[in-house]
Amino acid sequence: MGFLGVLDGETTGIFPLPLHPALSASAAAAKPIWCVDDQTWKSIRPKLPVAARAFADASAFKPDTGRHLIVPDASGGVAGCLFGLGKRGDKNSDPLLAGKLASVLPEGDWKFAEAPADARLATLAFALGSYRFGKYRESKRKRPRLVVPAGVDAKEIARIAEGMTLARDLVNTPANDLGPAELEAAIRALAKKHGAKVSSVVGKGLLKKNFPLVYAVGQGSERAPRLVEFTWGKPSHPKLTLVGKGVCFDTGGLDIKPDTAMLLMKKDMGGAAASLALAHMIMDAKLKVRLRVIIPAVENSISGIAFRPGDIFKSRKGITVEIGNTDAEGRLVLADALALADEEKPELVIDFATLTGAARVALGPEIPPAFTNDDALWNTLAKHSAKESDPLWRMPLWQPYMEMLSSKVADTNNVGGGHAGAITAALFLSKFVTAKSWLHLDIFAWNPKERPGRPEGGEAHSVRALYALLTERYR
């Protein structure tokens, strides 16, 4: 169920119809889903059709968390589905648990006869859980559809699911089919869909236009590096800028990664994918912002002209950078992109990047660390993070660690010592931003295992929480 097809360097521009394919507008023939917990099961059981109740009893159904049971009607057909929510008030329950239904229900239309407490989030979880990456091996199994409950905004659910699908498709696409040029094509397709103005600087044009760090990282690849950007919205509206790391594949450069660390490096453009997902939601919702999206798109390869440890480059901002490690390339391309973003003094700058392994060591694959110089922004974001079940954790821009980035021959090194890698990476980026409100997200962009609403594979961490924040602020 892909919404943006990228093939042989060309974008097909396949975007969804107004109603998401996992959702249905008609409840006429929809089968019921009874979502029950340990307290409601006793009162709902007697109300079930006789055959369904007898089958549930014979199956010793209990409303354990995530347990489902397809129950028959009197003629042997499907009467509906029982779905367990576990214990009422369990603080460890998954708010996206209903996403499991998308992978276990038979084909057809379904509706909540008894809905979870948060029907909106349950509907969104169902839509997110219906995602499958089928570009190379299409699933023959037809998916179920969920009737959007009364009071839930179907367009809003579809908008979020579409953005998440776009990001997942991009991250899941292997690097042989998604290099810098193909990523630019996907960006242009999204910009065209929403009437945004797009431009790019490619190859040695990066040096002429003063993006030396972007060029340095991508110079070792036969696939030309580039910086792609688009703008959307009225110039009079508040300026919001999104920056996404678009490293389409990362070998580590001359400081080459071990083979196991290279297996998932197709996802090193996950920051770009996340920024595009959020941009789609913003533009589709017509939020009152002047949006700017900046994507440095490169491949960090190994060749005779690849950049080296010990090289020194002057950045767009004028700061000279000594290369302590070529595998710390993401912060280099972001540095030039953030400097560009900063030049027009936007109200808010947000960057997404699959930046450090240290972030995963600290918080694991499910919780991205967030760094910001704006306490009020974080307080609001934390509220939406909890509400949307899109976890984030604030980490400090600890200024004493800035000395770890010191260089004896340049203004800064691109890496710190052996400690606090996520923090020193964020501190490096902070050298290139003067905006009073800046948020840096060090995301994993990948689900290592399937969970309700979160299939294994590419993911757009933090995007739903940010969209909720921006909607509250700018709608």
Image (cartoon, grey):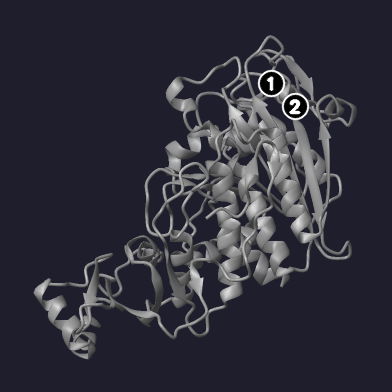
Q: Judge whether residue 113 can be spotted in this image.
A: yes
Please name the residue shown 46% across and 43% down the image: 137
Say which of 371 and 368 sits in front: 368
Please name the residue shown 79% across and 45% down the image: 229
Q: Which residue is mark 2?
A: 224
Q: Is residue 82 left or right of residue 429?
A: left
Residue 178 screen position, x and y as percent: 63, 36
Q: Secondary structure at mark 1?
A: loop
**In the depicted structure, whether residue 417 falls above or below residue 468:** above
The reply to whether callout 1 and callout 2 are in contact (CB within 8 Å) is yes
Residue that protrudes farthest toward the top in the picture:
304
Q: Judge whether residue 379 can be spotted in this image.
A: no
Q: Which residue is mark 1?
A: 221
Q: Residue 28, labelled with which disc? A: none
Q: Indicate the amino acid at tag 2.
A: Ala
Please name the residue shown 84% across and 24% down the image: 204
Q: Is residue 254 left or right of residue 239?
A: left
Residue 143 screen position, x and y as percent: 42, 63
Density class for disc 2 (Cα within 10 Å; few <14, some 14-19, many ≥20) is some
Say which of 405 and 85 sits in front: 85
Q: Secondary structure at mark 2?
A: loop
Q: Is residue 123 left or right of residue 379?
A: left
Q: Quadrant of the C terminus?
A: bottom right
